[in-house]
Amino acid sequence: MTSSNSVAIIGAGIAGLSCATALQNAGAEVTLFEKSRGVSGRLSTRVTDYWQCDHGAQYFTARDSLFHDEVQRWIDHAVAQEWQPLLKVFDGYTFLKKDNDSNTTRYVGYPKNNAPAKFLAKELHVVSETTVVGIHKQAGKWLINGMEHGIYPGRFDDVILAIPAPQAGTLLKNTTSDLLHICNAVIMRPCFALMLQYDYTIPCQFDGLFIQAGLLSWVARDSAKPGRKVASSRSSDVWVLHATAEWSALHVNDDRERIAQIMLSEFNHLLMVDASIQASAHALIAPKSQSLHRWLYADAEKYLTDICHYDTSQRIGICGDWTNGGKVQGAWLSGLHLAKQLITEHK
């Protein structure tokens, strides 16, 4: 590809950033559009004056050699580190050791999970706080319509949708691309994430917990990750709770304060099963601060495994974790392989 090839990428999560990096390295002129103030997608971190918390993807693994090399590059540039948490499984009655876990290496962004995304974005042209509400062709070129600023002045040869299936489907409705049918076949599910900051350390026997019963699916001591700091004169903990997809879907539009209250109560109940917590006078003290986030498209009921899709005739593609089995690795590989397909098509 050459600089005469212009590509618009909607979505600056890991898939979009991976795709943009590969295309730009191949010589294309790439513009990323992101509705949020910053990049990262699911590798998001909530930051306040006193604490921070990764409320999206909790960590990532690198089983593919290409992604392993990329993660090593992130480590070399000090934007990722290995995380060695004390992990347990809760079956509804007791805490169990996680089986077959000794060969799994987990990584996190450093000093927060959005650091790798910010690292990738440094060399890219990102148009932030732009909610793309429409794409259409004019004289053979793609035009991008943003809610905040109207039609973007640039014209593009290709458009890449690196966003969840329902959002991609909405943009594809006014096109003639068959990719719409692929998006419509994927059911995505919500997830509530509750972040909690305490002015003391909760003396429990785990840093991360996979939960097999109840309304929570995962809890983690975010402050146990490398490089995490809490601005407090006292010892502090920051925790994140993820609700199950089923429970989140059932209560997706419920009152947010009530949702947070229920999730916190469930966390307290879970903690009281831990013998080390039962003797603690702090066990049920309310957190000093908390924040709830609703991920409307957190995961897919059934992920695709096609890696990515590209409509050659319309010059439009889709990528993301939902097209490649889920996870951060799946998203990064999806974006990379879509970029390679475009490069091959337009040599």
Image: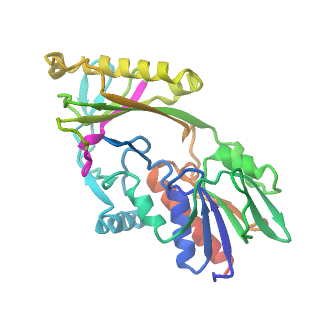
Q: Where residue 185 appears, x then y in whole percent?
A: 69, 42
- Span shown in magenta: 216-229
Examine the image and state in which quarter residue 236 appears: top left
Asked whether, in this view, residue 99 is left or right of residue 27, the answer is left
Q: Position of residue 215 (x, y in %)?
A: 43, 22
Q: Residue furthest right?
A: 139
| Residue 101 percent across, percent down from the top left | 27, 44
> Looking at the image, which residue is at 71% across and 50% down?
147
Q: Is residue 91 visible?
A: yes
Please state, as top left, top right, bottom left or bottom right, where the N terminus lies in the image: bottom right
**Which is more toward the observer, 341 or 239?**
239
Q: Is residue 254 above or below residue 22?
A: above
Image quarter where the C terminus lies is: bottom right
Residue drawn 57% across and 35% down? 189
* Residue 95, picture quadrant: top left
Where residue 339 appears, as percent x and y from the top left, is: 59, 69
Residue 226 shown in magenta: yes
Would residue 63 be visible to someone looking at this image? no
Residue 120, magenta (yes or no): no
